[in-house]
Image (tube, helix red, strand yellow):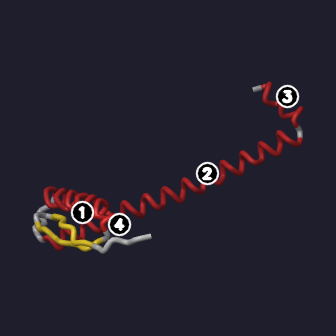
Amino acid sequence: MTHEAPTPTAVTILGQTLRITCPPDEQDALIKSAEFLDKKMQDLRARSAVGNNERIAIMAALNIAHEYLNLQNNQQQATHLNEQINGLLNKVRTCLQSEPEQAAKTLALT
């Protein structure tokens, strides 16, 4: 397995061009991340009277962290719900296997 040497990649955030070194196979992700951050910061600048780039960066970071934590929480809830559904499916399978005649009658009634 060969690794290419990291190379500088130019990204622009709030009109400021930065050169960030990263592996070539991560350049697309870096560019997309910078574009995402730039859009967030541009939106904040347009919605508020804050002209200070540092403050805009902090607000954008807080908003992104908040979104990330919400997504992480939603993922945990979905995982828990999936575990509950799998548990119920296992109980249904067990019932169907242990008492197939009763299960068939019950299913016929619905």
Q: Is residue 64 above or below residue 91?
A: below
In the image, what residue type sits under mark 2? Asn
Which numbered disc, 4 or 2, marks the residue that appears first in the sequence? 4
What's the residue at 21%, 57% (across, down)?
39
What's the residue at 43%, 58% (across, down)?
71
Specify few, some or many for label 1: CA neighbours under 10 Å numbering under 14, 14-19, or 20 or more: some
Specify few, some or many for label 4: CA neighbours under 10 Å numbering under 14, 14-19, or 20 or more: few
Instruction: Quote the CA–CA distance across marks 1 and 2.
Output: 34 Å
- Residue 107 x %, y %: 78, 29
Specify few, some or many for label 3: CA neighbours under 10 Å numbering under 14, 14-19, or 20 or more: few
State which mark lies toward you, 3 or 1. 1
- Horizontally, residue 47 falls left or right of residue 62, namely left
Per the image, the residue denoted by label 3 is 105
Per the image, the residue denoted by label 2 is 82
User: Would you say the residues marked 4 and 3 are in contact, meaning their CB atoms lie under 8 Å apart?
Assistant: no
- Residue 64 x %, y %: 32, 63
The number of numbered badges drawn on the structure is: 4
State which mark lies toward you, 2 or 3. 2
- Residue 15 x %, y %: 10, 64
Which numbered disc, 3 or 1, marks the residue that appears first in the sequence? 1
Which numbered disc, 1 or 4, marks the residue that appears first in the sequence? 1
In the image, what residue type sits under mark 1? Ala
Per the image, the residue denoted by label 4 is 65
Image quarter of residue 47: bottom left
Which numbered disc, 1 or 2, marks the residue that appears first in the sequence? 1
- Residue 94 x %, y %: 82, 45
What's the residue at 85%, 41% (across, down)?
97
Secondary element at image label 1: helix
State which mark lies toward you, 1 or 2. 1
Per the image, the residue denoted by label 1 is 34
In the image, what residue type sits under mark 3? Lys
Specify few, some or many for label 2: CA neighbours under 10 Å numbering under 14, 14-19, or 20 or more: few
